[in-house]
Image (cartoon, rainbow, N blue to C red):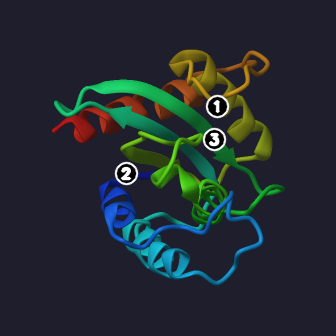
Amino acid sequence: MRSGFFSLELLYEHAKQDIAPPKGDGRGVKKHPAWSSYSRVRDQIMVEVPESTGWYVWLKASNSNDIEEIRYVGKTTKNQIASLRARLYDHFKRERYSFWVKGKFSGCTHVIWVADENLSNEQVENVERYLIQWFKPTNNKRRAKPKGDLKLAEEVKNIFETLFTSVRS
């Protein structure tokens, strides 16, 4: 398994610059100076995210780097958007306004990910259910309870908790 995290600080700094996003919700506005520079910053912070299945967490850390809130837990399976990188790109595209105004991920400071390309969709989904049940993210709909052997789910949870400690330092 591979894992890592990135800070969203550069995207917030970008949003504070004079480049304002289009009026409204921006849907359908494909060419805009704010989007092209936003995309460059997004690509820069996501350079380590693999083209693999796995899980990710959007979180908010305080100024003292304590974890204040786990906002969202997500996954990628082989049937879905095919990789962590592609799935996070999709989030960054749909929620790009969150860096200028209130949105689903407003205030989040980091994204943490764990990748493993050797798992079945059922394993990935079961671990996601476990992570949602364990971390209780504020923006996830509650899902069915995890089933069966939870050894893998515990292992992934422990990796996330270790990365939470890394975010704090």
Mark 2 Cα within 10 Å, few/some/many (few <14, many 20+)? many
In the picture of the structure, the residue carrying the numbered disc 1 is 127
Identity, as a three-letter code, of the amino acid under mark 1: Val
Eyeballing the image, is 141 above or below 56? above
Mark 3 / mark 2, whichever is N-terminal: 2
Give the secondary structure at mark 1. Answer: helix
In the picture of the structure, the residue carrying the numbered disc 3 is 74
**Is residue 111 left or right of 84 when viewed as pictured?**
left
Viewer-side label of 2, 1: 2
Mark 3 and mark 2: Cα distance apart in space: 14 Å
Which of 126 and 11 lies nearest the eye of the viewer?
Answer: 11
Which of 127 and 167 lies nearest the eye of the viewer?
Answer: 167
Residue 161, horizontal then vertical, whole percent? 37, 29
Find residue 66 and report its image quarter: top left
Residue 93, horizontal then vertical, whole percent? 63, 63
Going 80% across and 55% down the picture, which residue do you hit?
80
Identity, as a three-letter code, of the amino acid under mark 3: Gly
Whether residue 103 is visible here, answered yes or no, is yes
The quadrant of the rendering that contains the C terminus is top left
Mark 1 and mark 3: Cα distance apart in space: 10 Å
In the picture of the structure, the residue carrying the numbered disc 2 is 5
Residue 156, horizontal then vertical, whole percent? 50, 34
Marks 3,2: beta carbons within 8 A:
no
Identity, as a three-letter code, of the amino acid under mark 2: Phe
- Residue extending furthest toward the right: 79
